[in-house]
Amino acid sequence: MSSTLATAVNPLDSAVSKVKRHVLPLFLIMSIANYIDRVNIGFVNSHMQTDLGIGAAAYGLGSGLFFIGYALFEVPSNVLMQKYGARAWLTRIMGTWGLVAGAMAFVWNDTSFYVLRFLLGVAEAGFFPGVVYYFTQWLPQKERGKAVAVFLSGSALASVLSGPVTGSLLSIRGFGLQGWQWMFLIEGGFSIMLCGVSWMLLKSHIRDATWLTREEQSVLERSIVAEQAEREAQGGAHLPTIKLLKDPQILLFCFLYFAIQLTIYAATFWLPTIIRKMGGLTDFQVGMLNAIPWLIAMAAMYCFAVLSAKWRFQQAWLAVALVIAACGLFASTSGNPVLSFVAICFSAIGFKAASSLFWPIPQGYLDARVAAGVIALINSVGNLGGFFAPATFGYLQQHTGSITGGVYALGVASLIAAAAGFLTRDRRGAHRELSEALRSEVH
């Protein structure tokens, strides 16, 4: 009876299940470490100003320089990943970002802060596409979407965990180092440790996975090779960026995502500073309070996903989320720190939900032959919001003593994006220039 049950198990399903059990937990932890090392400077703004004299403008500029380094080296990193393989390249990425993140403990002035933040972006470039590439080599097409969703949930979990974890590390003292220095060393060191774990657990090829049976290795490898052959047979089209940017819809998608990212990263880097203004709070208490908006936002993202699936009008749901974000931003300028914090929680519902509601819109418009390239373009342009938002806020804080003007600008940008979202359309209304460009490339 037992042998009958064993043979009844589909070896492909068994192989896929084993792959997910072995790699998804690791990638989830890597994603959490990646996000924390990226945004932990939000908790040490005041400490670095006191100990090093790094002002608000320098802090804002340094926060944003990460995204410049990330954007410039994303493509070269992807090219090298194809050459050396995802296993080796992901391990390299983690090792270098851990070293740079740990080196932040020894920043001594504005310039060193700028250089290390830029280098952190360079080090992290290619991490997300590297993980996605690994999935393409190890999982059939139908399983990749779920795997990527689990991987991306790491950033949401990290938003919640970063506050309590970083807040507790800031209380450490010893060996002549301040709490913020220990925080950088420990969190960067954790990423370096993960580098070793990934090298031991990840394998370059399916045939190297000793935790798969010979039959499972064979059937999984054949399935992925067959899918790749089918995609190559279908062909595709590569359009230069300049041609893609001739389509007004693609420009509109870039603007929408840029506006959403502006708000997300402004809140990410400046929320601890807003919380600290409540007065009398320890670093750990600031960290715990910082987790609240992200917990609320995670629940809101799920609710919006359910509602938009039931009543399908993605542009309307995106507009609702952006209006909620704008209202929360405007209310956060009340002058009362407690009310401002509540308003930011309300705003987080909007801009985090908007981030997840946005992507189905361009996916519904784009031709499958250029979807991957356009999505990468939209993501690259949108992430530049991570540079402009903190840099602008820092400048305003430095020269006016307030970030109120920046908050109002973000609110207005959210309202404009809410209205602009209704100008988007699905593939049935695809722009003639894009269709003609595709035809000229294919034929």
Image: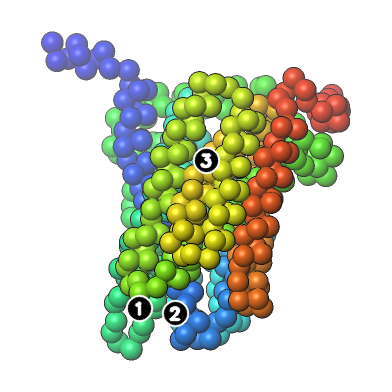
Q: Nearer the viewer, mark 1 or mark 3?
A: 3
Question: Closest to the observer: 343 or 310?
Answer: 343
* Residue topped by disc 3: 353
Location of residue 6 (image quadrant)? top left
Vertical placement of residue 188 versus 35, above or below: below
Dot 1: within a 10 Å radius of its alpha carbon, few (fewer than 14), some, or many (20 or more) residues? many
Location of residue 253 (image quadrant)? top right
Residue type at mark 2: give it: His
Question: How far is disc 1 from disc 2 in space, using C-alphas?
Answer: 9 Å
Question: How far is disc 1 from disc 3 in space, using C-alphas?
Answer: 34 Å
Number of the label disc, if any, that sits on residue 179 = 1
Find residue 187 and report its horizontal and vertical position in percent: 37, 66
Residue 403 in sight from this viewpoint: yes
Dot 2: within a 10 Å radius of its alpha carbon, few (fewer than 14), some, or many (20 or more) residues? some
Label 3 close to label 2 by CB (< 8 Å): no
Residue type at mark 1: give it: Gly
Question: Closest to the observer: 181 or 4?
Answer: 181
Of the residues under marks 3 and 2, which one precedes in the sequence? 2
Q: Is label 2 in a helix, a strand or a loop?
A: helix
Residue 158 in sight from this viewpoint: no
* Residue topped by disc 2: 47
Q: Nearer the viewer, mark 1 or mark 2?
A: 2
Query: Which residue sits at x=37%, y=41%?
Result: 24
Vertical placement of residue 86 versus 280, above or below: above
Q: Residue reaching furthest bottom?
A: 176
Query: Which residue sits at x=48%, y=64%?
Result: 336
In the picture provided, is 6 more to the left or to the right than 291? left
Question: Closest to the observer: 416 or 82?
Answer: 416
